[in-house]
Image (cartoon, rainbow, N blue to C red):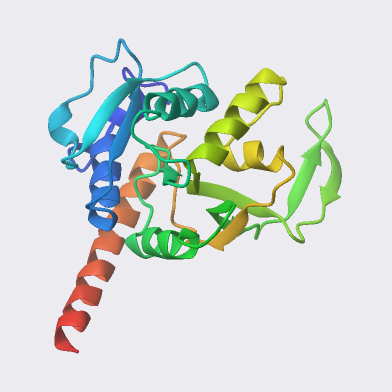
Amino acid sequence: MGADRPKQYLPIDEKPVLAHTLARLHHAYPQASLCLCLDENDAWFDPRWVPFSDWQRVAGGAERVNSVLQALDDLARLASEDDLVLVHDVARPCVHPDDLQRLLETLVDEPIGGLLAVPVADTMKRADKAGRVATTESRDGLWHALTPQGFRYGLLREALHSALDNDIQVTDEASAIEAQDLAPRLIAGRRDNLKITHPEDLMLAAHILAAQAKEIARGEVDDCNE
């Protein structure tokens, strides 16, 4: 991002990305317990941004897999093997409440787990070492993995530990589950579940959040009029 602070603290409409994300999660899951992974030396975080009544902070790791594992290990004294754990990237503040509800409803009786994802719509090119097109890849059956991703506590913890112990590279929770010869469920999500990665994404996220706010307000009014 080329910024003076981690991207989760960059502002969107005068609120940090992290605050938007946590507010969106709390709106969908008000009774959930939150485990927030942050760098031990993080000087930007303000606990007033956390709307959850039941939450804890744990030290983040070098990579996503390390952070998630540290959170799961910290929860060992509280969680049951079959408890559902949802992992969300705080850099995704635009995840829609409808997607969050559909994800939870789908995973209630899902033995393996699953993730929000969207089918690939663009033509996919594979580059060569010179930065030229080597080939055009078929996009049939390809999906963009999003978050949240949800799995049973015991299964996810075992899969992530196994991946690290066996030097298996995992870029998300689903890939660790796949390494256990299991097939997570793909749950179609919205394409506006943007991940803040580049500077221009902040402007896009602001437009998306504004449009979603109007959409959600209209839906709430319609529900009241029914």
Residue 171 visible, this angle: no
Residue 118 image offset from top left, x and y in percent: 58, 58
Image position of 186 (left or right of 17) = right
Which residue is the extreme one toward the bottom?
Answer: 226
Query: Considering depth in this image, is 93 or 38 the residue closer to the camera?
Result: 38
Which residue shows up at 64% across the image and 41% down it? Answer: 177
Image position of 164 (left or right of 188) = right
- Seen in the picture, residue 163 relative to 142 is either above or below; the reply is above
Query: Considering depth in this image, is 35 or 214 the residue closer to the camera?
Result: 35
Which residue is the extreme one toward the right?
Answer: 134
Residue 155, quarter of picture: top right
* Image mark count: 0
- Seen in the picture, residue 99 relative to 53 is either above or below; the reply is below
- Seen in the picture, residue 218 relative to 10 is either above or below; the reply is below
Image position of 184 (left or right of 127) = left
Residue 84 image offset from top left, x and y in percent: 43, 48
Residue 55, quarter of picture: top left
Which residue shows up at 30% across the image and 62% down it? Answer: 212
Which residue is the extreme one toward the left?
Answer: 48
Which residue is the extreme one toward the top?
Answer: 41
Which residue shows up at 35% across the image and 16% down it? Answer: 39
Image position of 10 (left or right of 100) = left
Residue 48, quarter of picture: top left
Query: Considering depth in this image, is 206 or 224 the residue closer to the camera?
Result: 224
Residue 169 image offset from top left, x and y in percent: 68, 26
Query: Considering depth in this image, is 166 or 87 the residue closer to the camera?
Result: 166
Residue 25 image offset from top left, x and y in percent: 30, 49
Which residue shows up at 20% across the image and 74% down it? Answer: 220
Residue 84 visible, this angle: yes
